[in-house]
Image (cartoon, rainbow, N blue to C red):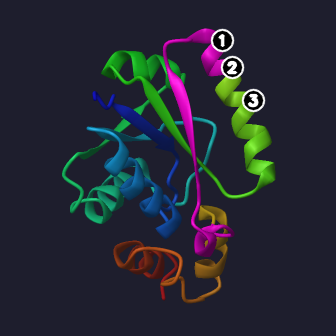
Amino acid sequence: MEHPIAVYAGSFDPPTLGHLDLMERAAKLFDRVIIAIGRHPTRNPLFSFDERLALLAEVTKGIPNLTVDSFDGLLFQYCEKVGARVIVRGLRAATDFEYELQIAHANADMAPHIDTVFLPTRTNYGFVSASLVREIASHGGDVSHYAPPAVSEALRKKFGR
C-alpha cells in the first residue's frame, strides 16, 4: 500500500515535545513527512526562522523519513508544489478541532485532492503549547518536561538564564 507524502506545518516557535510526538507518529504512518515552517511576515516570532529551522533539524535528526522545509502563502499550494497528498494536524482539545476543521474544509474546497489527517495529542501533551512553553521559559521556569533538550537550552539562552 502506498503511503503518500504528508506535510505537518506550523510556526514551531518553539518546537515542543507535543510537536515532536506528532512528527514521530506521522513518520510511522507516511513514507515521507515534511515539517514545513510557515513564514508569516505579520508575526513577530521569539525565534528567527533560521533558529527554528536549526532547532527542528536537531530534534528530528533521528527520524530518517522526515525533512524540514519552509513555505510562504497557502499550505495547500505548498503541498501541491512538493507532491504531498496529506496535511497532518494535531488536536489538543475541542477548541482546536473547531478551528482546524474550518481550515481543513477550506483546504478541501480549494484542493480536494489533498486530505487532512487529525492526530490527537497524547494525554501528557494535551495542554502543552508553544506559547505556554515560551511563557514559562520567559519567567525562568523549567520547560524540560515540555520541550526537547535542545529547545530548552535555546530558551535558556534566549532569555539570558
User: Left or right of 73: which side holds 135?
Assistant: right
Q: How far apart are labels 2 and 1 at the CA level?
A: 5 Å
Based on the picture, tell me whether residue 67 belongs to the magenta stretch: no
Q: How far apart are labels 3 and 2 at the CA level?
A: 6 Å
Name the kind of residue labelled 1 in the image.
Asp
Q: Position of residue 38 (x, y in %)?
A: 49, 38
Based on the picture, tell me whether residue 110 belongs to the magenta stretch: yes
Residue sitting at x 42%, y 79%: 157
Q: Determine which residue is flagged by label 3.
A: 102
Residue sitting at x 39%, y 80%: 153
Q: Secondary structure at mark 3?
A: helix
User: Left or right of 23: which side holds 136?
Assistant: right
Residue most toward the front? 1
Q: Position of residue 35 (x, y in %)?
A: 38, 43
In the rendered structure, find residue 109 and report the number of the disc placed on it. Answer: 1
Name the kind of residue labelled 2 in the image.
Ala
User: Left or right of 154: which side holds 82?
Assistant: left
User: Left or right of 96: which side holds 12?
Assistant: left
Q: Determine which residue is flagged by label 2.
A: 106
Q: Quadrant of residue 105?
A: top right
Q: Which segment is the magenta one? A: 106-128
